[in-house]
Image (cartoon, grey):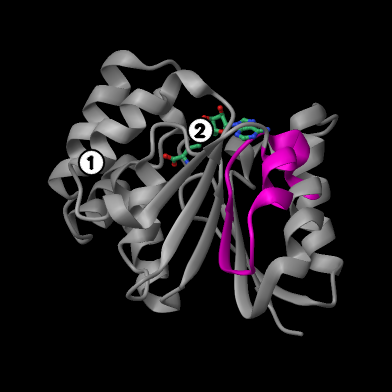
Amino acid sequence: MEFLDPKLDDYVVRNTDPEPQVLQDLNRETYSKILYPRMLAGHYQGRVLSMLSHMIQPKRVLEIGTYTGYSALCWAEGLQDGGVVDTVEINEELETMIKKFWEASEQAHQIRLHIGHALDLIPQLDGNFDLVYIDADKENYPHYFDHVIDRVNKGGYIIADNVLWSGKVIEDQPDHETQSLMDYAQKVHDDPRVSNVLLPVRDGLLVARKTI
Ligand SMILES: C[S@@+](CC[C@H](N)C(=O)[O-])C[C@H]1O[C@@H](n2cnc3c(N)ncnc32)[C@H](O)[C@@H]1O
């Protein structure tokens, strides 16, 4: 589902930074070689993630759901000096492609890939995070929040993608994934440890800032 009129969408993109060359190449190869390429953040959303990262200037980012590595590169653009993005992906078959494009980027040394189930791997990562990006299996969004909330620094962020789920979140009789996304939004909204705003960027970004 497209939320914006195509002409307005075109205007939005024309008034947004161009997509960096390495991301253009990764975008093109993902669409030509990998299943479900719409999962990749893409030009406009990628520039939004990059801008958020520059605004937050995180030292540690945890990304849940790497896919072909596009959004990890966007988050890495705004890291503080010496900062790191840890990103977790369950599909080991994507590793070669992910690394090929990261190695062609300026951010290669700032991104670490972890292959496995995020709920198993997150407890094995050390330290706390300034920003967590949730963009993996929708059924586990509420579990991811529970897994990371105590490891987000005060003033840090948890940002979740696809919270509008192509508009399905306002339909009657939601399916399992949709219900999980609705539960996630309610959970974040009810949690006194965070303040939140839902940005209708592409498929919806729910931004939560940890206040205590
Ligand atoms: C929407 S894609 C991520 C897109 C990526 N963040 C981007 O914008 O370029 C979701 C990814 O999460 C991965 N995934 C699904 N379940 C997972 C899990 N339990 N642990 C880790 N990764 C998972 C999928 O294999 C898929 O590559």
Residue 79 lies in the magenta-colored region: no
Give, as a three-letter code, the residue at label 2: Met
Q: Residue 75: where, in percent of width, then height? A: 39, 58
Direction from residue 188 to residue 14 in the image, left or right: left
Q: Amino acid at mark 1?
A: Glu
**Image x and y of residue 87, in percent:** 51, 46
Real-space Cα separation, disc 2 to disc 1, in angstroms: 34 Å
Q: Dot 1: within a 10 Å radius of its alpha carbon, few (fewer than 14), some, or many (20 or more) residues?
A: few
Q: Which residues are magenta?
A: 118-142
Give me the residue at 30% from left, 54% from top: 109
Q: Which residue is mark 1?
A: 103
Q: Mark 2 vs mark 1: give the one in front.
A: 1
Residue 132 lies in the magenta-colored region: yes
Question: For residue 185, what is the image quadrant?
Answer: bottom right
Residue 92 percent coordinates (x, y):
50, 22
Secondary structure under tag 1 reads helix
Q: Residues within 10 Å of mark 2 (few under 14, many from 20)?
A: few
Marks counted in the figure total 2
Residue 100 vs 60, above or below: the answer is above
Residue drawn at point x = 23 percent, y = 60 percent? 16
* In-image side of 67 versus 135 (left or right): left
User: Do we see residue 36 in this rendering?
Assistant: no
Q: Could you say which quadrant of the image residue 41 lies in?
A: top left
The residue at the point 39 percent across, 77 percent down is 55
Q: Which mark is residue 72?
A: none
Viewer-closest of 113 and 189: 113
Up/down of 17 relative to 171, above or below: below
Residue 159 is situated, as x and y percent measured from the top left of the image, at 59, 59
Residue 186 falls in image quadrant:
bottom right
Q: Earlier in the sequence, mark 2 or mark 1?
A: 2
Q: Which residue is label 2 attached to?
A: 1
